[in-house]
Image: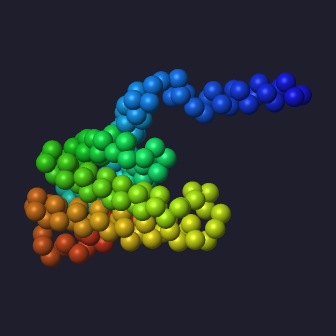
Amino acid sequence: LADRRDTLGDTMAATTAPLERFTPRMQAVLRNVLLMLACLPLVRLGLTTADDHRLIATFAPAVGLAWAGLMRWGPAVTPGVWLGLAAGFVWGGASWSLALALATGQALGACIAAFWLGRASFDSRLDQPRDLWLLGGAVLCGSAVLSAANAATWLMLAGRIPLLDLAGAWLTWWLGEA
């Protein structure tokens, strides 16, 4: 039975860390590629809930993935997140310039939330109520606010929404990311 546990433990270690056989630089590149390829369809999935040309989704699964990737692997994966978000917006019908602006806001919001949570000694197991409050504060008051302000502003400047709809666009974007 002990041999069986050792074999099972070795198997689990081999499957949970497949990137460990690569150099640290190659691990960073692979993580970036992985997040880029994962964010791309998730942005498009979120945009299926958006109006025809406004690009304001009612949920944003790619931002959750970006935040989780940044929390797990650090800021080194930001380029992959940013490129995946931008490509997803282009696939969803945005121009390259608008897609880059929207992706910058979302990636920056996720980076700020991950950085703040890291500085606040956030425990991802959520064992303490403090950790839940930290998570809610980082997402609701940090990441989503910044991203929503960025997106609503750029969508208005790009002519996708009128000035009178700016507050509604901000609120919808914020709710989608929260």
Tell me the quarter of the picture where residue 25 sits: top left
- Which quarter of the image is occupied by the N terminus? top right
* Residue 76 visible in the shown view: yes
Residue 87: horizontal and vertical position, in percent?
26, 41
- Which quarter of the image is occupied by the C terminus? bottom left
Question: Residue at left 37%, top 42%?
Answer: 76
Question: Residue at left 58%, top 59%?
Answer: 123
Tell me the quarter of the picture where residue 13 sits: top right
Q: Is residue 114 left or right of residue 96?
A: right
Q: Is residue 9 left or right of residue 17?
A: right
Residue 105: horizontal and vertical position, in percent?
26, 57
In this rendering, the answer to whether 57 lies above or below 134 is: above
| Extreme residue in the right direction | 1
Residue 145: horizontal and vertical position, in percent?
32, 69
From the viewer's side, name the closer residue of 178 and 54.
178
Question: Residue at left 25%, top 45%?
Answer: 86
In this rendering, the answer to whether 68 lies above or below 56 is: above
Q: Is residue 10 left or right of residue 41?
A: right
